[in-house]
Amino acid sequence: MIALRNSEKHGRRIQTTINRATEDLNLRVTVRPAGESSEVPIWERVQTKPQREPSIQTATPWQELLAGQIIKEQPEETSIAGLAHRYADVVGKAVSTIRAELTKRLVHTGEAWAAAQ
């Protein structure tokens, strides 16, 4: 099935769906009449720059983001286990996972949380 789609967010494009395909084909296009008095459409593919997928190396892992947030906020918890319970819902990870990762990244100096050496 082939359809001409038009939306404000994605622009005008041709969308194809094939039963056995692993993914749909989605091409940005422009449409213009073949002539001044013609109703025949001419579809031309819009050449766009390929968007680079963010690589794993350039993305900041959740562990580093959470450690930075804890150092910035300085919560009243003085144990890694307390931090893990506090931030489990925020991060969306298991308490044991958070505890294992924070142990590698944070230490409590007696007064504040700091980055582990």
Image: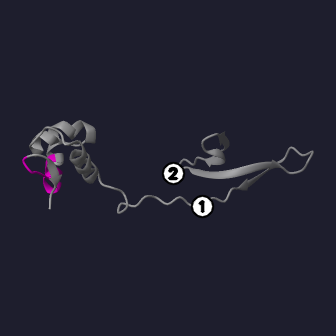
19 or 79, which lies in front?
79
Q: In the rendered image, is residue 1 in sight?
A: no
> Which residue type does callout 2 highlight?
Glu
Q: Please check the rendered image and state whether residue 102 is part of the magenta-colored stretch, yes or no.
A: yes
Query: Residues under labels 2 and 1: Cα distance?
Result: 20 Å
Please identify the residue farthest to the right as the structure is shown: 37
Q: Which mark is residue 23?
A: 2
- Does 66 sit left or right of 8 as displayed? left
Where is residue 40? Give x, y as percent: 84, 47
Residue drawn at x 86%, y 43% as measured from the top left? 39
Quadrant in the picture for the C terminus: bottom left
> Which residue type does callout 1 highlight?
Lys
Q: Please check the rendered image and state whether residue 85 is part of the magenta-colored stretch, yes or no.
A: no
- Does 68 sit left or right of 104 as displayed? right
Graded by Cα atoms within 10 Å as few (under 14), some (14 to 19) or many (20 or more), the crowding at tag 2 reads few
User: Which circle's residue, 2 or 1, is located before the other in the chain?
Assistant: 2
Residue drawn at x 33%, y 55% as measured from the top left? 60
Q: Secondary structure at mark 1?
A: loop
User: From what the image shows, is residue 86 above or below residue 103?
Assistant: above
Where is residue 74? Give x, y as percent: 19, 43
Question: Which region of the structure is painted magenta?
Answer: 99-110
Tag 1 residue: 49
Where is residue 89? Give x, y as percent: 24, 36
Q: Secondary structure at mark 2?
A: loop
Please identify the residue farthest to the front as the structure is shown: 111
